[in-house]
Amino acid sequence: MRKKLLLLITGLMVIFVLAACGSKSQEDVVKDLEGKLDDLTSYKANAKMTLKMGSDSQVYDVEIWHKDPTFYRVNLKNAEKDQSQMILRNNEGVFVLTPALNKSFRFQSDWPQNSSQAYLYESLIKDIASDKEAKFTSTKDYYIFETKTRYQNNSMLPTQEIKLNKKDLSPAVVKVMDTDRNALVTVEFSNVKFNTNFDKDDFDMKKNMTRAQLGLPAMANGEKDQSFTVKYPTAEMDGAKLVGEKQVKIEDGKRVVLTYEGKKSFTLVQEKVQAKVASTSPTYVEGDLVDLGMTIGAVSDHSLTWSHEGVDYMIASKDLSREEMIEVAKSVQGEAVK
């Protein structure tokens, strides 16, 4: 009887030891992620990105390509509205392409190193590794981290939940949350492939623009209707009020100028022009590339420009900070109210 009891105790000890060996600590997982990143030469991934804006949601299909060290191609497409935008980085710089409008912009930017990017794997690892106060949990299939974000407007989106597949440490789901822990951005990954091969011209700006335009409807490049619905920001900037709305006729389109005055005054310009034949060289943009969720913009100390659904927008202000301009820009896509 005593012998059986000893065998039972020994067996239980072995089980406990094996169980302990099988569960990794937060430090172990972070170390594994950093090692994975060191060995990573490239990857391809698909994702569904859902943006909550007030009571509405917009869903984007995202295709992500990365080739170490600095080549990126991120294609964002809103299938419902048949619009797409591409962020491209190669040896020539950082580009934002809007194929339907024949527009290409070039930035002098260190994107994506300067901010969190919910759809870039290496950015998620950097967020995890750099946050010494990150929370960690482990389930049967996932490692889950809750970290601070590195967004330019991180006061609005301060935290994120990053769920990784235990099997290969690939990203599964990322939720970027506001101060009330509501998920305003959700990225659901699929078909993640590490260390993939790319063709020589996969990150070439002109080739990507041409390929993207091949699948566009015929109306996209020949549309002559410059009408659009004027949108008004819902974000309140220290009581700034709309004091002027002026419509200006321009040669190939329509422009509306909204003037807001108060403690923090600003001007919002909205403009729609007929798509032109693509230029052989992109337009150089002063400012840093900023992800507005529904589109990509360029922000400087006193202005923020972006395009959405065929309309060009610009905020100009000497009073608003970059973070405040970003907040106003995001709220313009809400309900059209004054």
Image (spheres, rainbow, N blue to C red):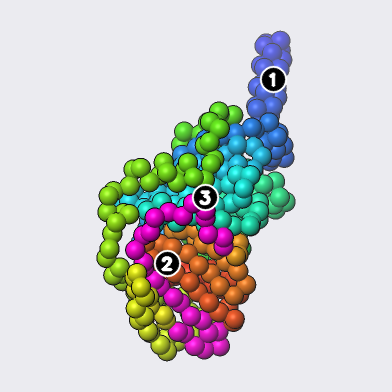
Q: Which residues are magenta?
A: 259-285
Seen in the image, is 298 located left or right of residue 28?
left
Q: Residue at x 59, y 81 (%)?
A: 318
Residue 262, given in percent of the width and then of the height, sits at: 52, 89
The residue under label 1 is 14
**Left or right: 10 as drawn, with respect to 162:** right
Task: Choose mark 1 or mark 3, whichever is in front.
Answer: 3
Q: What label sits on residue 124 in the rendered view?
A: none
Do residues under tags 2 and 1 come within 8 Å of each other at their CB atoms?
Answer: no
Tell me which label, 2 or 1, sits earlier in the chain: 1
Q: Is residue 188 visible?
A: no
Q: Give amino acid for label 3.
A: Ile
* Residue identifier under label 3: 87
Q: Is residue 270 magenta?
A: yes
- Would you call the spot at circle 1 few (<14 residues within 10 Å), some (14-19), or many (20 or more)? few
| Residue that appears at 34% across and 63% down | 274
SS at badge 3: strand
Instruction: Give the image location of residue 237, x and y in percent.
Output: 51, 80
Res. 182 visible in picture: yes
- Please state the total of marks drawn on the protein image: 3
| Residue 216 image point, x, y percent | 33, 47
User: Magenta includes 292?
Assistant: no
Q: Which residue is mark 2?
A: 312
Separation (CA) of disc 2 from disc 1: 66 Å
x%, y% of residue 280?
A: 49, 51
Q: Is residue 218 above or below residue 226?
A: above
- Which of the pair 173/320 is nearer the observer? 320
